[in-house]
Amino acid sequence: MIRICSTEDVPKGTAISADVDGTPIALVHGEDGEFYAAYDECSHAAVALSEGEVDGCTLECWLHGSRFDLRTGEPTGLPATEPVPVYPVDVRDGDIYLSLTPSNGVTR
């Protein structure tokens, strides 16, 4: 697993963008208190998901309003129909780590 940042860098209910070995990642502190990581590009349009709104365990693309479940990567609202890769996250000693192997099997 790769260290990304401190938990303090991602306030609850927000998302930040991170470049992890050339892979754009949207790192999210969900409203449920958990941390999530998804590929930082909407599967409908090439737009950074990290610039969207966090709602519960979903992240909304700001351009067309597609929502993605941060646990599965599945779209929960149109116009997106394809899932985005999501990545395993581990929090240790106040730091956030992730694996670049998608937990949902989706690749980009």
Image (tube, helix red, strand yellow):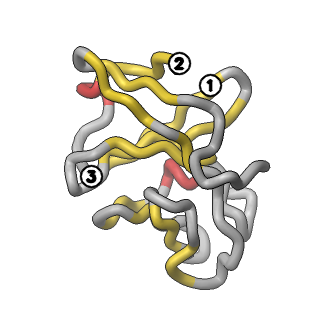
Vertical side of 70 occupied by 14: above or below: above
- The residue that label 2 is drawn on is 2
Q: Report the side of 23 relative to 54 (left or right).
A: right
Q: Position of residue 67 (x, y in %)?
A: 50, 72
Residue 48, can we see it? no
Residue 78, by quadrant, is bottom right
Q: Position of residue 83 (x, y in %)?
A: 65, 66
Vertical side of 33 occupied by 73: above or below: below
How far apart in space, not on screen, are marks 2 and 1 (Cα)?
8 Å
Q: Earlier in the sequence, mark 2 or mark 1?
A: 2
- Residue pushed farthest right? 108
How far apart in space, not on screen, are marks 3 and 1 (Cα)?
21 Å
Residue at the spot 44% in from the left edge and 24% down from the top edge: 97
Residue 46, by quadrant, is bottom right
Label 1: few (<14), some or many (≥20) within 10 Å?
some
- The residue that label 3 is drawn on is 13
Q: Regarding mark 1 in the picture, which secondary structure is present there?
A: strand
Q: Regarding mark 3 in the picture, which secondary structure is present there?
A: loop
Q: Amino acid at mark 2?
A: Ile
Q: Position of residue 3 (x, y in %)?
A: 46, 17
Vertical side of 41 occupied by 24: above or below: above
Discs 2, 1 touching: Cβ within 8 Å: yes
Q: Earlier in the sequence, mark 3 or mark 2?
A: 2
Label 2: few (<14), some or many (≥20) within 10 Å?
few
Q: Amino acid at mark 3?
A: Gly
Q: Regarding mark 2 in the picture, which secondary structure is present there?
A: strand
How far apart in space, not on screen, are marks 3 and 2 (Cα)?
23 Å
Which of the numbered marks, if any, corresponds to residue 20? 1
Q: Report the side of 33 relative to 21 (left or right).
A: left
